[in-house]
Amino acid sequence: MHTDTERCVRAVQSKDARFDGWFFTAVLTTRIYCRPSCPVVPPKPENMTFYPSAAACQQAGFRACKRCRPDTSPGSPEWNQRADLVARAMRLIGDGIVDREGVPGLAARLGYSTRQIERQLLAELGAGPLALARAQRAQTARLLVETTALPMAEIAFAAGFASIRTFNDTVREVFALSPSELRARLPKTRTQAGGGGTAVSAPAGTPGALNLRLPFRAPLNPDNLFGHLAATAVPGVEEWRDGAYRRTLRLPYGHGIAALTPKPDHIACRLTLSDLRDLPVAISRCRRMLDLDADPVAVDEQLRTDPVLAPLVAKAPGRRVPRTVDEAEFAVRAVLGQQVSTAAARTHAARLVTAYGDPVDDPEGGLTHLFPTPQALAALDPESLAMPRTRRATFTTLVGQLADGTLHLGVESDWSEARARLLALPGFGPWTVDVIAMRALGDPDAFLPTDLGIRRAAQELGLPSTPAALTARAAAWRPWRAYAVQYLWATDSHPINFLPV
């Protein structure tokens, strides 16, 4: 979008928050870059230039605006609605791969050379993987400076910097303030950040907890999003308490507990981490689970073109697709949920969690384990599973292939390739494959025409109810059929019974 100068100028002049994260405005006279909705007086059009990423702005010598805090914009919707190389690379960078494994590790995950990846990222985003990871480290550093009392040396290490000097130089270059100056101006920042800021409150209560604000593009309807997560929560791993969805997180350097509470203009996020180096990954996974980087206006505009869906969208706009923090975990839970009630699937999962999950200490009580890894589940005795023999075979084949790496499901997965691999497994039909594609892989166009809840909703609404006819009708909803599923499920009085755990 950043190449459409006229459209970008209109967005900046109208302070349209829908475009935050889509592009960044760099002001040639002040050498500052902003989000489109920056509250200051817009610069003259001739003084504006536009970039596709904060990293590109930083590489061009611009520093972040202290008023609108462009580094805390919602992420670009592009990376969660595409499955090409650039989108997959961006999802991996957000998950911290470059910091942990370097650019060669990123390339290995994607199956391309480092040169190919750098060339494509530069062409589309104006910055290579190292610069994109550096921008993420700077944002992590700012979060820790503003939300903890940690010494700066510990913050530098936790944010992924190799040295204190690099940490100081990067923060000063990006934010035009030293780390100490960022911390000193925290009260003022809290006032300025408003609903768009990501982390503005100091931690209180639970030791080691960070209180964050996760921004999103309005509107957001939390009903189906949090309702589904709460209704399918696996005891010990997830719970709904005091208006918050809480769950344990398995992270690269340790584990964590996230508590997520919907607010009118943000999601309140409380993170308790065993290792602060996992902060950016934990934030990225929570945002992905709640589909916070979606563009609901674009989705709803497309779905409103269907006269049957239009009233559903008008009644409750901004529905999101509830996703997951762990793709392999969701695939296992989808199999556990085949042909049984939600309650039965939760019982199956809870037994596995107790027997094979890693125990964790929840300072607030209620959560006890991480969901078991495929490696741990591969060691169980299939005869101990209280399920039909054919489904036991499906379960053991899935966890075996996940454990030995034959099948890999992750943010970098190619959706078409993953679908084909899943369909080749025994007991995996189109419904199971597409629900994994929708919820785990994040394909916004995944569709479930054979789902009983969808077919019943279609019949009640006067839509075709046979899978073939419904698929033909749904062609007009593309590329947002996964969101159409959320609107159709919401019409059913008991939609949760037709969802996998």
Image (spheres, grey):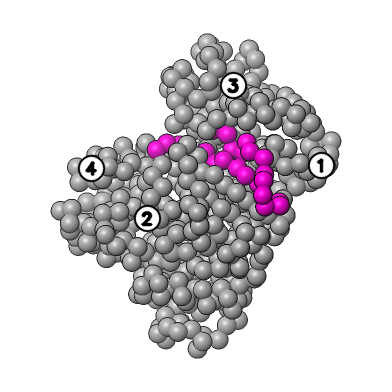
Q: Which amino acid does the dot numbered 2 rest on?
A: Ala
The numbered mark, 2 or 4, whose residue comes first in the sequence reads 4
- The Cα atoms of the two marked residues, 3 and 1, are separated by 32 Å
Q: Which amino acid does the dot numbered 3 rest on?
A: Ala
Label 2, residues with CA under 10 Å away: few <14, some 14-19, many ≥20: many
The numbered mark, 3 or 4, whose residue comes first in the sequence reads 3
Label 4, residues with CA under 10 Å away: few <14, some 14-19, many ≥20: few
Residue 94 is one of the magenta-drawn residues: no
Q: Quadrant of the C terminus?
A: bottom left
Which residue: 72% across, 54% down? 275
Dots 1, 2 in contact, CB < 8 A: no
Q: Secondary structure at mark 4?
A: helix
Which residue: 39% across, 69% down? 342
Q: Position of residue 234 (x, y in %)?
A: 49, 67
- Which residue is under mark 4? 311
Q: Secondary structure at mark 1?
A: loop
Q: Which amino acid does the dot numbered 1 rest on?
A: Pro
- Which residue is under mark 1? 151
Magenta stretch: dominant secondary structure? loop
